Amino acid sequence: MIRRMRAATSDSERGTVSVFVVGLAVALLVLAGLVVDGGRAINARAAAYDDAEQAARAGANEIDVFTLRRTGQVVIKADAARRAVDAFLAARAYPAGSAVTEVGEREVRVKLDGDVDTSLLTLINIDSFHVTATATARAAIGIDAEIGGAP
């Protein structure tokens, strides 16, 4: 009688460890995906911010020298600044239209948008992360009292 109860119990639980192992493996793959793909997304955001910052600086370098010499005012040439930003981003292999450039009288703002493809998180239907970075550069000549020191 005892042998029959043991046989019935072991037959009804057969395969439960397999289901547990499969579930644990999926959970570990998702966790690895968060680490790997999340790290790639953080790295891509830092790189995009750096590129936006450098592109804004390239644009802010395009000052109107004639106006500076005539009046002493620092004014950015808008068309030249946009071309400088576009040239910098093209050299960094950004596709056309991935940046929004706003040019003011003394500053240039660059906003970059992009997507980072995932590798492991595609298992749970997350195909990419959206990355956005915005940076502003201000044109200054010499010591500028408004910013409290050297440019």
Image (cartoon, grey):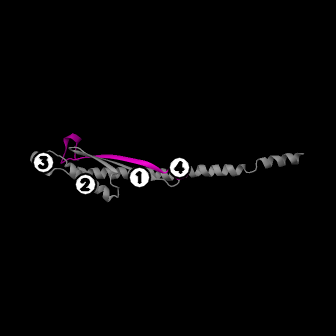
**Is disc 4 surrounded by few (<14), some (14 to 19) or many (20+) residues within 10 Å?**
few
The quadrant the N terminus occupies is top right
Front position among marks 1 and 4: 4
Residue located beneath label 3 in the image: 67
Disc 3/disc 2 C-alpha distance (Å) = 19 Å
**Is disc 3 surrounded by few (<14), some (14 to 19) or many (20+) residues within 10 Å?**
few
Residue at point 71%, 50% (across, down): 17
Q: What number is the disc on residue 120?
A: none
Residue located beneath label 1 in the image: 44
Identified by mark 2, the residue type is Ala
Identified by mark 4, the residue type is Asn
Instruction: Answer with mark 1 or mark 3, whichever residue precedes in sequence.
Output: 1
Residue located beneath label 4 in the image: 125
As helix, strand or loop, the secondary structure at mark 1 comes to helix
**Is disc 1 surrounded by few (<14), some (14 to 19) or many (20+) residues within 10 Å?**
many
Instruction: Answer with mark 4 or mark 3, whichever residue precedes in sequence.
Output: 3
Residue at point 27%, 53% (across, down): 85
Front position among marks 4 and 3: 4
As helix, strand or loop, the secondary structure at mark 2 comes to helix
Disc 4/disc 3 C-alpha distance (Å) = 55 Å
Q: What number is the disc on residue 84?
A: 2
Disc 2/disc 4 C-alpha distance (Å) = 39 Å
Instruction: Answer with mark 1 or mark 2, whichever residue precedes in sequence.
Output: 1
